[in-house]
Image (tube, rainbow, N blue to C red):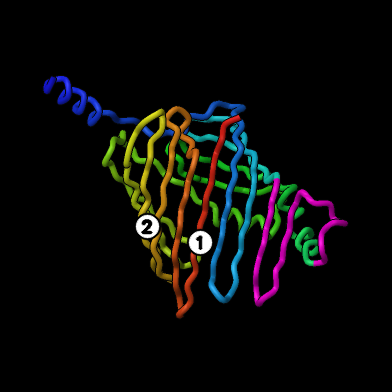
Amino acid sequence: MLFVVLSTLNIAAQKSVLLRLNYSPGDVFVVTQDVSQDMGAQGGLDIKMSMEMKASSILGDTINTESQIKKINMNMLQAGQIMSFDSTMKEEDLDQMGKMMKQQMDPMLKATIFSKVTHKGEIIDVKVEPVTPAMAQFVNQKQSVKYPEEKVSVGSTWSDENSMQGAVTKMIFTVTKIENGKVFVAVTGDVSGAVKGVVKGSLEIDIATGIQNLADIEVTMGAEGSKMVVKTKSTITKL
């Protein structure tokens, strides 16, 4: 009995997987994202968005994708004023502020995002057609999780770093469990540079496709006496 138990534990401890994006040309995914930004008394922002992403072609280690935003729902509180926009509503049903926001959002809904990403998840190029100022800002904020070179098992860690608008974000990914065809990862990190902050969250990665079925990240930042908490929850589902 003791031998069986020890053998089972040893097999479980040795379980390891290679994290890679395994797309095939023509694969289609639905991407949802819910972003909330809390700035305390200064206000806040909540955006819910749905996108459709297609793997158009694969050339060597490069996966070419095409994405389009299908729906946007936005609620913003600033200086005591509430501004809302829902792309599924008819223009005549929107209030005056909603109609003004529609003029800014409509070009985003008509644009296509062309991305080049490696099988390890690293974004190497992004462009938008047609080019719009709002979409350019959205693309500049687009980040990815780069997978490690080697296989991972429970307890494995890897790190990544990116810089944007004077802020450097360092993140550490730790595998907490591997079961039911998924790798569960805890995320920790910090923000330095123009602002200071901490990062925490979790990922659920599908082993077969390499997609992040769920990403739940919270970033708490502060600068010049102000504090901001940004929570991002994303899901990716293969159709």
Q: Earlier in the sequence, mark 2 or mark 1?
A: 2
Q: Is residue 182 above or below residue 196?
A: above
Q: Is residue 167 above or below residue 237?
A: below
Q: Which residue is mark 2?
A: 170
The answer to whether residue 24 is left or right of residue 95 is left
The x and y percentages for residue 203 are 43, 44
Q: Secondary structure at mark 2?
A: strand
The x and y percentages for residue 93 are 85, 56
Q: Secondary structure at mark 1?
A: strand
Looking at the rendering, the stretch of residues picked out in magenta corresponds to 71-96
Question: Which residue lies at the image location 58% right of the left edge and 75% below the top edge?
Answer: 42
Crowding at dot 2, Cα within 10 Å, few <14 / some 14-19 / many 20+, comes out as: some
The answer to whether residue 37 is left or right of residue 128 is left
Crowding at dot 1, Cα within 10 Å, few <14 / some 14-19 / many 20+, comes out as: some
Camera-side mark, 2 or 1: 1
Q: Amino acid at mark 2?
A: Lys
Question: Which residue lies at the image location 67% right of the left edge and 76% below the top edge?
Answer: 80
Tell which of 180 and 212 is nearer to you. 180
**Label drawn at residue 230:** 1
